Image (spheres, helix red, strand yellow):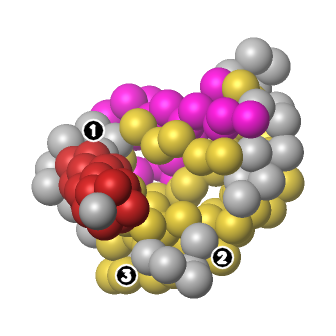
Amino acid sequence: MSGVRVNLLAVKLYGMVLASCAILGVHVVQGQGHIVEIVADKDSRYKSPDGRKPEITLKAGEQVLLRVSARKAKSWNRDGSIHGFTLLRAGDRSKVPDWNLLLRPGAQEFQLTAPAEPGEYVVVCTVICSEDHEGMNMRVLVTP
């Protein structure tokens, strides 16, 4: 009987973890790694799908599927990109390889690998999307 209780507790705990991830705009799907959903919005802000400012937590070196819905702000690049999504190390503001993305209008997905080095990172927009462009950033925490 105690084995059944332990299994039920594990199922409940797993459900609570998934609910917490959904609240943060982070979705985990078995077999696909870590799925992160972000909106690059027309008001020159990154948001979780529910409209709140996102903060992403990743494990060092894990596979990440980044799903971004991009909405056009007041200006954009000649190549048609409307926002950028570049991951920088918070300390020295150096770019993380393979995390320099240009976003076009609509939904797109990127298969990425989280940085190997734990620490604090920041995402910035690299497309001058409006006069509020400088405020388009968000925090990323990479844990061991």
- Residue ranking furthest to the left: 50
For mark 1, what is the residue? 53
For marks 1 and 3, give the CA distance. Answer: 18 Å
Residue 132 covered by magenta stretch:
yes
Residue 48: x %, y % from top left: 27, 52
Query: Image point 66% across, 36% down: which residue?
Result: 142
> With respect to residue 41, does 132 lie above or below?
above
For mark 3, what is the residue? 107
For marks 2 and 3, give the CA distance. Answer: 14 Å
- CB contact under 8 Å: marks 2 and 1: no
**Residue 109 shows up from this direction:** yes
Residue 108: x %, y % from top left: 46, 81
What is the crowding at mark 2: few (fewer than 14 residues within 10 Å), some, or many (at least 20)? few
Q: How many labels sit on residues? A: 3
Which is nearer the N-term, disc 2 or disc 1?
1
Label of residue 111 in the image:
2
Name the mark nearer the viewer: 2 or 3: 2
Query: Image point 33% across, 55% down: which residue?
Result: 2
Q: Which residues are magenta?
A: 120-144
- CB contact under 8 Å: marks 2 and 3: no
**Secondary structure category for the residue under label 1:** loop
What is the crowding at mark 1: few (fewer than 14 residues within 10 Å), some, or many (at least 20)? some
